[in-house]
Image: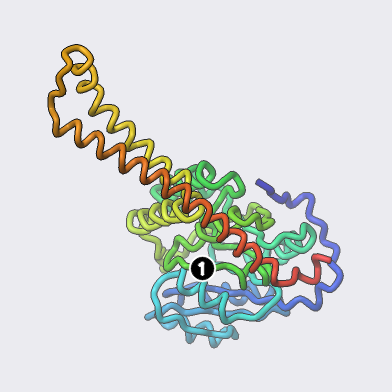
Amino acid sequence: MKTANLETFDPRPVSDAEEARIAVTLPCYNEAATIADVIAAFRTALPAADIYVFDNNSTDGTAEIARQAGAIVRTEMRQGKGHVVRRIFADVEADIYVMADGDGTYDASLAPTLIELMKRNHVDMVVGTRANVTKDAGRGGHAFGNSIFNRLFNAMFGRQFSDIFSGYRVFSRRFVKSFPAVSGGFEIETEMSVHSCQIGIPTLERPTPYGVRPEDSASKLRTFRDGFRILGMFFMLAKETRPAAFFGAIGLLLTLCALGLSAPIIMTYLETGLVPRFPTAVLSMGLIIVATVAAVCGLILDSLARARVEAKRSVFLSYPAGKWSK
């Protein structure tokens, strides 16, 4: 994976930087305690940027506070961060998109650094990885889940990212406008990471500090509910992007089960010439047939998946690279 280091950061301006339209986008749900400070911090860091707050049915006055703080406020009625991100990507027009959470846990002062890294390295997404998040994510269950899911992602999709759940990201226009965004909840970051790996989008990581929520600001992440949703997204994306491996694993598991069930029957037949436990023999044969069908489906779907990758890649390349990428 490619990780940027602050010591190598070159602060010199990039040509045409003044022409790039920058949008700061903040998905929010009940962040009244922090949203004004977050808007002020990004306004200081990126004074020329448009700041959008996409409110997701908040009941604590988040939208009004954001409006008073000078942000452009939009509303997404479908509950879930994935729905909000899909709306952001569809509605906001810019050359560079900065996305962060409205809870104040991300360091807004590093936004110019992330943008500069994207320009200088000619990448389409920079992820502000959360320092020590796999050791301390505010709650022990979250830290453990981050560690497990990141390892699972690396095993399934490749070692391109070290923090797939970071909500602090900078995107190019062509990433935003070509990203399918089918997730509805917190699994949206996982979908972004898989999409990047699948079609070979150039990305970069930069470690950033990860703050602690104020006492009067509660996390919207439910450890077990959202954990199972993310796990389900992992397997759904594995099915969609690597069907040969996915269905091949199912076929192999069924074959092993069939062999385990049929081994005693085969041994008895070789010794006595008789076939005892006939129903078990039928079940074993049925499992072999299903395993074969699964393997064949995997091979067929793998061809379709390759065609989809080519189509996604074509859509991505149909959008021009940023002015700084020349």
Looking at the rendering, which quadrant does residue 260 occupy?
top left
Residue that sits furthest to the top in the current view:
271
* 67 in relation to 105, above or below: below
Q: Position of residue 99 (x, y in %)?
A: 59, 69
Residue annotated with mark 1: 181
Q: Position of residue 312 (x, y in %)?
A: 60, 64
Count numbered badges in the picture. 1
Residue 248 appears anywhere in the view: yes
* 120 in relation to 26, above or below: above
* 103 in relation to 63, above or below: above
In the foreground, 256 or 27: 256
- Residue type of the residue flagged with mark 1: Ala
Residue in view at x 62 percent, y 73 percent: 177
Q: Quadrant of the C terminus?
A: bottom right
- Crowd rating for badge 1 (residues with CA inside 10 Å; few <14, some 14–19, many 20+): many
Q: Position of residue 13 (x, y in %)?
A: 84, 67
Q: Position of residue 248 (x, y in %)?
A: 43, 41
Looking at the rendering, which quadrant does residue 229 occupy?
bottom left
Looking at the rendering, which quadrant does residue 273 occupy?
top left
Q: How is the image coloured?
A: rainbow
In the foreground, 257 or 134: 257
Residue in view at x 63 percent, y 72 percent: 41
Residue in view at x 47 percent, y 46 percent: 244
Residue in view at x 49 percent, y 63 percent: 188
**231 lies left or right of 35:** left
Residue 210 appears anywhere in the view: no
- Helix, strand or loop at mark 1: loop
**30 lies left or right of 207:** left
**36 lies left or right of 172:** left
In the foreground, 198 or 111: 198
